[in-house]
Image (spheres, rainbow, N blue to C red):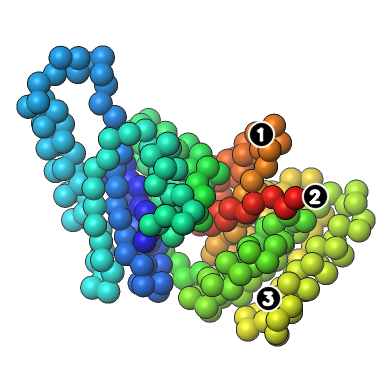
Amino acid sequence: MILFPTDFSDSSAQVFPYALDFAAKTGLSIHIVHFYQVDLGEFHGATHFQYTDIEKNLTEEMENFLKMLPKNPKVRIESSLEIGFPIQSIKRLARKGGKYDYIVMSTQGQRNALERFFGSIAAEVSVRADIPVLLIPSGVEYKHFENIVFAANRESVHKESIDAIRALVKLYHSTVHFVYVGDGREKGDKEEIREKIINILFEEDTPDFPFLIHLIEGEQVMDGINHYIDKTNADLTVFCNISRNFWRSILHRSTTKRMIMNTRVPMLVIHLEEEQE
């Protein structure tokens, strides 16, 4: 099942075709959910009818939102309202081995400051959730994932991540671009990355999808990736979020979130456990 968190914004509705098409290709259903909080200070002593009014208004918003969305007879869609803080609630729902397989959401809303805050929620969810998160920038029109850019480094080039890429390629018949951006200080890095990619791809048999390996020199990974995206007109980037110990993870999460907030094309964030040394 695909979890589709929404803030009812036009931006959220605009990215729904990605979730719908992905669901149709995978045979998954979609759960559209809106998380909300009740201000206990504001509603101290509130009656049952006041709480009912809140839920009634949100139910109407959900119904109006659903009317905006395209439909596919092959895809089952359900919706619900959930009380709770979005980040914590989504993390609780999106545990590995749970009922959800993917999260699909917009990187930001459009109408007001609250919806812009939705973008920071998307970034935080992408690094906290256990399952893959597909993030769609606001204003991006639906495109088939014909060219997929995989951000390669020593940690992300992993059998688990490449298996996830294989699954995508089967759905979209894509070409995969493995792109490594390095500053050139470690001369052995480029060849090590290339060799690791080749070894995993050919481990069992000849790869059944077209791929390219590009090794780029640059100081900033996202700048190098964005330059490559512009040059190749790529449709999707794939990043891996590596589980780390507490202090090292702070830096990694902040870097990942900056990448997410500045992405120009849809981004898939895959979560991997850090290998023990």
Which residue sits at x=37%, y=54%? 3
The N terminus is located in which quarter?
bottom left
Q: Mark 2 falls on what kind of element? A: loop
Callout 2 amino acid = Glu
Callout 3 amino acid = Phe
Callout 1 amino acid = Phe
Residue 150 located left or right of residue 63? right
Which residue sits at x=32%, y=34%? 84
Residue 181 quadrant: bottom right
Q: Give coordinates of residue 116: x percent, y percent.
A: 41, 35
Could you classify mark 1 by the number of other residues whose Cα lies within 10 Å: few (under 14), some (14-19), or many (20 or more)? Answer: few
Q: Is residue 6 visible?
A: yes
The disc label shown at residue 246, or none: 1
Badge 1 or badge 3: first in the primary sequence: 3
Instruction: Give the CA separation, mark 2 to mark 1.
Output: 17 Å
Could you classify mark 2 by the number of other residues whose Cα lies within 10 Å: few (under 14), some (14-19), or many (20 or more)? Answer: few
The residue pinned by badge 2 equals 277
Asked if marks 2 and 1 touch (Cβ < 8 Å), the reply is: no
Residue 184 located left or right of residue 196? right
Residue 206 located left or right of residue 257? right
Front position among marks 2 and 1: 2
Q: Mark 1 falls on what kind of element? A: helix
The disc label shown at residue 224, or none: none
The disc label shown at residue 211, or none: 3
Pick the front one: 202 or 231: 202
Which residue sits at x=18%, y=39%? 58
Q: Give coordinates of residue 105: x percent, y percent.
A: 41, 51
